[in-house]
Image (tube, helix red, strand yellow):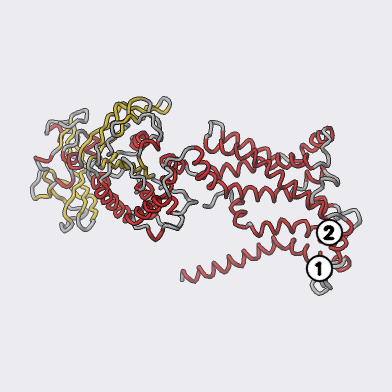
């Protein structure tokens, strides 16, 4: 079990209100990703759930039990930190066994659980090494191993992949997703990387300045963002946001169109010159200066031979335009 | 081509490093060489210094004339005593500054360190008078207190930088793993702090062992450490290079041996925890 309910929780540091009243329910077995720009309060929210910070008001329930004032260890949650936070003076084996040792579990059972976790995470041959002798990815796996052995109600991940290089990040991302599928335990994952959020989450919580902007599945957020913030944050490259006369013509304050939805045609209404063409192989990203509209990013298949300086015309897809009012809310 | 320049560069750096190392070591080497010469050969040095006869004569004489063991024992008591006392005071101080810093922690540290910038001789007279009035002149207890106080700023500062290096997330991880305060101190903090404390201890023992200003001013015989032992051969009977060298060699030998066996800790100590 691992259902977590947050009821109007707040957090202030002195006079600064980091989290205004916030409600959220995380269902058992869900993979929930908190995503948002740095300083949006996502890590603070995670630390409040973990119990590493006290909430200023409100209520936290874990599996129906009131955990508001419970110590971190009593909440039955396990956390994987950004810096891995391994104990540098202990071997991998002792690192993984530490929570079991604290729980005063019999040695034989400890050994069995550690061996089992090491097997799942491909760490069996490193058990007697120190964390300092491991690579970044292996350290990350040890940190996950230390979380697994406790069989927690939920796993909390605080930007666990941000210290890894790009290639390893993709591999570890998949490993964590696979782990979730096999363990079926609730996971709460904090990241500022919207690609991680889109690929891993069952449910994404988009945060901005401590407030929840929108909660939904990755595709829901992609297809129907509730406001400008979510529209600009989810999707890569970012959605083009157009204001001024062109928006007025569509009866809104801001008009949004995703780069992948713009079509390059012979006689589209938007004409412009390609300022920059980024060739990624499979795709090409074009920066096009469209007269009366502004700079737009356009995503076209890589085989289209378009390059800098060419004049092209674009067709905005009528059914895939996003319209926002003056307050930034979707119309 | 780049490979060749790297090799040349490495050769130059190696030669330079050995040269500098030799230059720094040379006075000690010279002292050791002279200590094995007769007084007559020593005074003629550097002529025939390597070809003239080697002898233990100076050591015999130093041994006969003064009590090496007494001075040695005083040095041990003073350096170890002052170091342990300093650690006793500095560990809680550095601990609280590193883990529960206040608004003025940095200023406090700077102020402590600034006391080291004052020349010791500036307080010689008041210190001497206080020692005289309290009957502490030429006592070990008095010197232990003085050596503790003069090294305390460095000890606090070093321990502070070590403790600062222990990441807060590790303590949080331990708390998540179910460690209470006792287990946290026992299994996480202490093992992680011990290398830092050991380096500090070693460096401070060496600093206290070599301290010459206060030990020479405030002792005569009873509490006199090895610095006094060397000084007693430096002038009164004219120039006795060989005996002075023998006394110096005997005084630095213990600390040299200690330093040799604890090189790793020492380097860590001297770099103030800058390298991980």
What's the distance in space between the residues labelled 2 and 1, CA to CA? 16 Å
Q: Give the residue displayed 18% in from the left and 46% down from the top.
A: A259
Judge left or right: residue A75 versus residue B161: left
Q: Position of residue A163 (x, y in %)?
A: 38, 50
Q: Position of residue B123 (x, y in %)?
A: 77, 36
In percent of width and height, residue B203 lies at 65, 50
Q: Residue furthest right?
A: B237
**Observer-nearest of A172 and A146:** A146
Callouts 2 and 1 close, C-beta under 8 Å: no
Compared to residue B188, the image places residue A25 above or below, namely: above
Mark 1 — residue?
B46
B204 to B108, vertically: above or below? below
Q: Secondary structure at mark 1?
A: loop
The quadrant in which residue A228 appears is top left
Give the residue pinned by disc 2. B244
- Could you say which quadrant of the image residue B133 lies in? top right
Instruction: Depth check: give the residue in front, A148 or B60.
Output: A148
Name the element at disc 2. helix
Q: Which of the two residues, A270 or B159, is positioned nearer the viewer here? A: B159
Q: Chain of mark 2?
A: B
Q: Earlier in the sequence, mark 2 or mark 1?
A: 1
Neighbour tally class for label 2: few under 14, some 14-19, many 20 plus, Cα within 10 Å = many
Tell me the chain of label 1. B
Q: Quadrant of residue A150?
A: top left
**Quick check: can you spot residue B128?**
yes
């Amino acid at each position: 079990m691992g259902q977590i309910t947050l009821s109007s929780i707040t957090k202030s540091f002195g006079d600064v209100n980091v989290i205004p009243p916030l409600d959220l329910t995380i269902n058992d077995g869900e993979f929930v990703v908190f995503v948002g720009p740095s300083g949006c309060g996502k890590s603070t929210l995670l630390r409040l759930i973990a119990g590493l910070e006290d909430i200023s008001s409100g209520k936290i329930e874990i599996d129906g039990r009131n955990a508001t004032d419970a110590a971190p260890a009593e909440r039955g949650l396990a956390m994987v930190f950004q810096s891995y936070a391994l104990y540098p003076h202990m071997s991998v084996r002792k690192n993984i066994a530490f929570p079991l040792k604290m729980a005063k579990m019999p040695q034989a059972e400890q050994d069995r659980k550690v061996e089992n976790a090491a097997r799942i995470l491909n760490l069996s041959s490193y058990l007697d090494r120190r964390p300092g002798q491991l690579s970044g990815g292996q350290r990350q796996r040890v940190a996950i191993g230390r979380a697994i052995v406790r069989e927690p109600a939920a796993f909390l991940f605080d930007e666990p992949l941000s210290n890894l290089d790009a290639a390893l990040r993709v591999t570890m991302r998949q490993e964590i997703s696979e782990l979730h599928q096999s363990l079926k335990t609730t996971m709460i994952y904090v990241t500022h990387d919207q690609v991680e959020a889109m690929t891993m989450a069952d449910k994404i919580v988009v945060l901005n300045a401590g407030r929840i902007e929108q909660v939904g599945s990755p595709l829901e957020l992609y297809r129907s963002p509730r406001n400008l913030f979510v529209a600009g944050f989810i999707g890569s490259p970012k959605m083009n946001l157009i204001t001024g006369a062109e928006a007025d013509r569509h009866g809104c304050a801001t008009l949004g169109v995703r780069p992948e939805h713009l079509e390059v045609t012979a006689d589209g209404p938007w004409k412009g010159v390609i300022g920059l063409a980024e060739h990624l192989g499979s795709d090409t990203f074009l920066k096009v200066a469209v007269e009366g509209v502004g700079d737009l990013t356009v995503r076209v298949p890589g085989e289209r031979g378009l390059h800098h300086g060419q004049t092209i015309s674009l067709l905005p897809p009528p059914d895939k335009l996003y319209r926002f009012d003056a307050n930034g809310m979707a119309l | 081509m780049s490979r060749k320049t790297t090799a040349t560069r490495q050769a130059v750096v190696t030669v330079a490093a050995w040269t500098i190392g030799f230059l720094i070591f040379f006075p000690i080497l010279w002292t050791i060489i002279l200590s094995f010469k007769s007084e007559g050969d020593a005074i003629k040095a550097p002529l025939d210094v390597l070809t003239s006869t080697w002898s233990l004569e100076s050591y015999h004489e130093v041994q006969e004339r003064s009590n090496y063991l007494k001075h040695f024992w005083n040095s041990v008591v003073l350096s170890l005593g002052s170091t342990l006392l300093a650690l006793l005071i500095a560990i809680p101080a550095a601990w609280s500054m590193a883990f529960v810093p206040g608004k003025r922690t940095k200023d406090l540290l700077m102020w402590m360190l600034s006391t080291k910038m004052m020349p010791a001789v500036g307080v010689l007279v008041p210190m001497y008078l206080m020692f005289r009035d309290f009957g502490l002149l030429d006592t070990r207890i008095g010197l232990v207190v003085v050596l503790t106080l003069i090294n305390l700023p460095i000890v606090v500062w070093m321990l502070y930088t070590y403790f600062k290096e222990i990441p807060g997330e590790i303590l949080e991880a331990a708390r998540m793993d179910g460690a209470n305060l006792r287990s946290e101190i026992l299994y996480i903090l202490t093992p992680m702090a011990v290398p830092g404390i050991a380096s500090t201890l070693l460096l401070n023992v060496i600093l206290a062992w070599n301290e010459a200003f206060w030990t020479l001013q405030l002792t005569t015989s009873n509490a006199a450490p090895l610095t006094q032992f060397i000084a007693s051969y430096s002038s009164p009977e004219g120039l006795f290079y060989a005996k002075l060298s023998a006394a110096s060699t005997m005084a630095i030998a213990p600390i040299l041996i200690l330093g040799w066996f604890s090189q790793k800790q020492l380097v860590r100590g001297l770099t103030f925890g800058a390298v991980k």
